[in-house]
Image: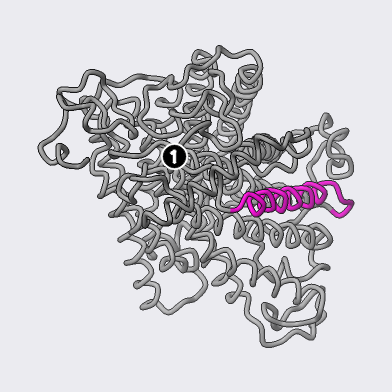
Amino acid sequence: MSSTDITINKDVHHAHEEHDHHHEQNFIEKYIFSQDHKVIAKQYLFAGIFWGFIGGFLSILFRLQLGWPEATFTFLEPILGGWVVNGKLDPEFYLSLVTMHGTIMVFFVLTAGLSGTFANFLIPLQIGARDMASGFMNMLSFWFFFLSSVVMFISLFIETGPAGGGWTVYPPLSALPQAISGSGTGMTLWLISMALFIVSQLLGGVNYITTIINLRTKGMSMTKMPLTIWSLLLTAILGLLSFPVLLSAALLLIFDRSFGTSFFLSDIYIAGEALANTGGSPILFQHLFWFLGHPEVYIVILPTFGIVSEVIATNARKPIFGYRAMIGSMLGIALLSFVVWAHHMFVTGMNPFLGSVFMFLTLIIAVPSAVKVFNWIATLWRGNIRFTAAMMFAVAFVSLFISGGLTGIILGNSALDIQLHDTYFVIAHFHLVMGAAAIFGMFCGIYHWFPKLFGRMMDEKLGFIHFWMTFIAVYLIFMPMHYLGIAGFPRRYYSWTGFDSFNMFTDMNTFISIAAIIGFGAQFIFLFNFFYSIFKGRRATANPWHSNTLEWTTPINPGHGNWPGEIPTVYRWPYDYSKPGAEEDYIPQNVPFSQTQSSNMPYERDLE
């Protein structure tokens, strides 16, 4: 950035600050239609927590069916109405539960809730900006997400039920309104909701990228940015390039459903009657969906890479091991995520040579992932570790990422994947490596930045109880599923008691369901801790974790504009922990080298 650009940015920032000083905002401007990135981050966080409990509750409903397939659940009739008949869950509604659980958790919790919260909150604070590049666009991003949420929530209550057909909504089931009840109005609302959701993500992504590139404070070069900012930058780029492809798939699906086109339909028979649709291909939809779907895995997990790196370095009191290698590995993962989508399609009859190409690319992506794991472990090695609640979730994230990633190597092999496809082995793999790991990364970030979000501390003892119950429950749920999958147990089946070969797994399914109920119950400990601490938690100090990044240089409860005076200048990278010769075990980024003569390296003495 040139000196002229910096001067212009400072002028804009000061003008922005003076405007806020003279213009007193009312409640609606300040908390509802806010353009302050910190308030918008909280809006995303509250929405993400709400959807997290909805998605979790739906999973408990279908785990009841799977754990006790012969039992009657009359207590559900007042809740679910006509979808429970004589205590039995309706089979089509079961498919809708699975569909909505996947949709809510992947998009509304782990994409919007995670990225929306931490990108909005951390980007301006950690790069030294007053706010996002466009506060208005930022506000629009949240409100498109909110509209999307409203439409999706309404679809849960319509007479024909919410969308059914799996969270991937493969045609022809999703393209024919007459196919099942979940293909009707619920599917239409699902598609409308996802279109609004994608608009939200694109508005947010443009804003995040522009802010990081253009609004960094003086001295904040790209190689001095925290890994959180690198991860959020790459996440935004992935979303900007891949979400439009899903939007095109959704629009074409709407055309097939409502306007008689045949993009995804051909040679379809319903009740013995041939439909007029010819020339389409459902495989085309799979290509479009998974071209978003696989980068989406990394849109979900990349922000947590940055969050976990920051928390591990802070609480190990050590510089992050291999800073540039960490950036390079994230760049490699982002690039490779666009060329592996067809490993989800090994059973579609693709050319075996093409399958071997995608298999090779899939296995290669394990290399940068392994680099990250090695660097996290190396950062922990011989560190002066503080076991805060955030640190516990960070270490558990590494454990889950390793456990789930190892089974990804198995599924990346097409010969093995063909046998394991659509079994519980796949369920266990992606829930460990993406679902549970990303949730743990989200909890890690909430516990770590809660003091900066709300000016108070969360209760650490309750945090530990929440952690251990959740961590144990996750492994008790998903580790047995690997065994079920190897035995051929299929996913999405409403009932398996009619198959003699699967009846032996009744006890294991019951065990998994009990673990899921306990794990879901543990989240109410977090919920209590979170909301109680907002109002009654111990008041935070300015920098409770003794961290180096710029957000801790703001007031405890920063106003709109973040810094009351000038924005701090950055002199050093964000991981100067336990530096030999230093008076304390951390040196914030805004401390000049002239103030740390005793700890300066030879090359640092000439940097000012």
> Which quadrant of the rendered structure holds the C terminus?
top left
Residue 529 vs 381, above or below: the answer is above
Q: Secondary structure at mark 1?
A: helix
Residue at the left extreme of this rendering = 602
The number of callouts visible is 1
10 Å neighbourhood of mark 1: few (<14), some, or many (≥20)? many
Q: Where is residue 294 drawn, in percent x and y?
A: 49, 60
In this image, 138 relative to 311: left or right? Answer: right
* Residue underneath mark 1: 126
Q: Where is residue 148 drawn, in percent x and y?
A: 73, 53
Q: Main secondary structure of the magenta part?
A: helix
Pick the residue in front: 246 or 493.
246
| Location of residue 339 by image quarter | bottom left
Measuring 53% from the left and 21% from the top, which residue is drawn there? 466
**What residue span does the magenta drawing correspond to?**
134-160
Measuring 22% from the left and 33% from the top, which residue is drawn there? 593
